[in-house]
Amino acid sequence: MFIETFKSGIFNKDFRRQLLVTLSAIIITFCHGIGLGWLSPMLPQLQSAAETPLDFVIDVSEASWVGSMISFGGFSGNFLFSFVMNRFGRKVALYGLALPHTCIWILFYFADSVEWLYAARVCAGLSGGGMFIVLPLFIGEIADKSIRGRLCSFFSLAINIGIMVGFIISSHVPYHVIPCTVVVLPICYVLLTTRFPETPQQLMRWGREEEAKRSLKYYCNCDGPTPSKESERAYQKQFQEMRDALQQQTKESGSESLTLSDFCNKRALKAIATGLVLMVGNIFTGTFAFINYMSNIFERVHTQLEPNTNTIIIGAVQIVGTLASIYLVDRHGRKILLIVSCAGSALGTGAFGLYAFFGDETEADLSAISSWLPVTIMALNIFLANVGIISVTMVVLVEVLPPKIRAVGTSACLGCLSCFAFTSLKAFPLMMEYWGLAATMWGCAAVSVLCFFYVIVFMEETKGKSIYD
């Protein structure tokens, strides 16, 4: 049975091109993950006069700015790449993601003041904000609805693998060697991106029907000289469905331009509200801040394991959580994963806060359990967050928004995500410093509880939903 499921899923020959194109496109998210993971082990070094690999040392306030500057770039990247994607197409936007990412490593290499680090993090935000807009829509448009959830989850998997690689190399590889190695990856990404066509939906919007047919045949893997009858029938059905849906959208709107009424109807408002709640959950449940400041967090709870070792363990757990999400998302649906994830995040951050309270506030002797309990609690929390609220959020966002406002609605939600991320990354180290780690963790737990109730009461299941509905 497992073999049959394996063959009928993303590895089915009809979906082979969709899988390969997705794997090529997410190389840039892997690169972005390395940039994110680089910060956590490197930040304590940059704050230490004895360990800094650069000619300067940064303080807590500057560290919070280094962490949060990524969100400035993210906000700009959301809207910049949304414009590029809608004006020039998905492929041009994919090419453009490589430019700011390449700048990250050049700036890191030549940094001679903290402002260079700020600029590098802004570039990381530009590429990250852009890829959160472009890649879920690109993958959603090329993927068959039966595997769309799994392919979109590859986006999160690539980021998490990149984060773990970033944790490892910034812990064990000399500072100036890292940029020289990683800068090769975006070049490989651009070369691979030239190998596949624009999405058929975008070509149809431009009125290039013949090119759209060839593109759809490519992604359906039926563009050979002798395609099977079954593949040809599936292609014809999918093309007709796509054409009818796009024609219906144009007919209903009367034009391609958006109006206020497109956003103010009941369906659109509910979809946007769901998107915003998911953005809040994605950031303020704490996982993104944890990833950026993981080594600092483990230093504060005085774990017996070396903080960077704990951080690498958490990076591996993230990957396992995302793999679980990929396996479950198209089998059991999006809603149940989000419910389990929000509940698990609430329990995990609450328990970690309790541990921090007894270890920090009461100065209790926790030496007997400090070697395993903090990393175990954090690992459980990160695993459950990646099963749902991290991995599934972008899948649901693409599926829940009506087609006509999908690009703009996604940009708006991700613009809010960048604002939330800035607030979280700027405030988190200051809250740890002035409020204590326990109170900070309990705040994250409270947000998880609110998201848990919203998903149960208001969110609809989107599994199996057509991208055109």
Image: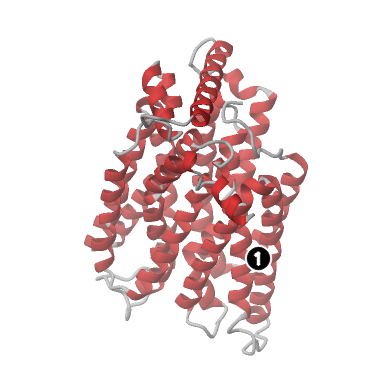
Q: Residues within 10 Å of mark 1 (few under 14, many from 20)?
A: many
On screen, residue 113 versus residue 66, left or right, reads left
Q: Which residue is mark 1?
A: 349
The colour scheme of the drawn protein is secondary structure
Q: Name, please, the residue furthest toward the right.
A: 457
> Which of the 4 quarters of the picture holds residue 446?
bottom right
Q: Position of residue 428 (x, y in %)?
A: 53, 61
Q: Position of residue 398 (x, y in %)?
A: 56, 36
| Quarter the N terminus occupies | bottom right
Give the amino acid at mark 1: Thr
Q: Position of residue 107 (x, y in %)?
A: 26, 56
Q: Position of residue 270 (x, y in %)?
A: 68, 32
Q: Secondary structure at mark 1?
A: helix
Residue in view at x 67 percent, y 52 percent: 337
Q: Is residue 199 visible?
A: no
Relative to 440, say whether 230 is above or below: above
Relative to 397, say whether 181 is above or below: below
Q: How many marks?
A: 1
| Quarter the C terminus occupies | top right
Relative to 394, say whether 356 is above or below: below
Is 329 or 123 nearer to us in this picture? 329
Q: Is residue 50 visible?
A: yes
Relative to 121, say whether 355 is above or below: below
